[in-house]
Image (cartoon, rainbow, N blue to C red):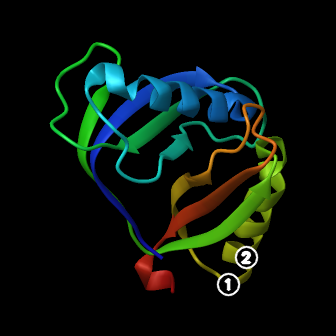
């Protein structure tokens, strides 16, 4: 599987996994202030993804229409590519996502794949403000030579 997006606004936040739907919704609600509209699915990752729900550093990437101007709160990334990834889908509360991540990591280990990225999440449906009915695709990039 591959994930590809271009012309992305990036946002760094220190947050708990359970709060990421609220952060993403807040960014979406305020894109118009920056003169943008979303142009694809949001992507996020946790820098120190330790599986807990403690506060962690997260990077949120949102593809947008139009030129991204410099901002003190948001960065920009021309292109995001995640290639040769293994993917599974998570439906339900984001608080329960660690079980989905563990299943994906077990699958990778069972098939002797070599993970080369952390976990990336693509938001299919952000769900309600509590994140109880989210739909996320969960990706981990693996070494092409281990496939």
The numbered disc on residue 111 is: 1
Q: In the rendered image of this protein, does residue 30 appear above or below residue 143? A: above
* Residues packed near mark 2 inside 10 Å, few (<14), some (14 to 19) or many (20 plus): few
Q: At which x and y percent is residue 79?
A: 25, 52
Q: Quadrant of residue 36?
A: top left
Mark 2 vs mark 1, CA separation in Å = 6 Å
Going 75% across and 33% down the picture, which residue do you hit? 18
Query: Does dot 2 land on a helix, a strand or a loop?
Result: helix
Q: Do the CB atoms of the residues marked 2 and 1 lie less than 8 Å apart?
A: yes
* Residues packed near mark 1 inside 10 Å, few (<14), some (14 to 19) or many (20 plus): few
Q: In the rendered image of this protein, does residue 145 appear above or below residue 82? A: below
Going 34% across and 26% down the picture, which residue do you hit? 32
Q: In the rendered image of this protein, does residue 134 appear above or below residue 128? A: below
Q: At which x and y percent is residue 7?
A: 24, 46
Going 15% across and 36% down the picture, which residue do you hit? 67
Horizontal arrangement in the rendering, residue 30 relative to residue 13 (left or right): left
Query: Does dot 1 land on a helix, a strand or a loop?
Result: loop
Q: Quadrant of residue 74?
A: top left
The numbered disc on residue 107 is: 2
Horizontal arrangement in the rendering, residue 94 relative to residue 86 (left or right): right
The numbered disc on residue 3 is: none
Horizontal arrangement in the rendering, residue 27 relative to residue 16 (left or right): left
Q: At which x and y percent is residue 93?
A: 81, 46
In-front residue for pair 81/65: 65
In-front residue for pair 50/60: 60
């Amino acid at each position: 599987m591959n994930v590809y997006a271009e012309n992305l606004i990036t946002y760094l936040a220190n947050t708990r996994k359970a709060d990421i739907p609220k952060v993403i919704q807040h960014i979406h609600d305020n894109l118009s202030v920056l003169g943008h509209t979303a142009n694809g699915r949001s992507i996020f990752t946790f820098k120190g993804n330790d599986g807990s729900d403690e506060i962690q550093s997260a990077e949120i990437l949102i593809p947008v229409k139009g030129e991204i101007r410099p901002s003190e709160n948001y960065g920009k990334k021309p292109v995001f590519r995640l290639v040769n990834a293994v993917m599974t889908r998570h439906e339900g509360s984001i608080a329960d996502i660690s079980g989905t991540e563990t299943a994906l990591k077990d699958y990778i280990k069972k098939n002797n794949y070599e993970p080369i990225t952390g976990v990336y999440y693509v938001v299919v449906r952000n769900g309600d403000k509590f994140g109880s009915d989210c739909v996320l695709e969960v990706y981990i990039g693996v070494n092409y030579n281990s496939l």
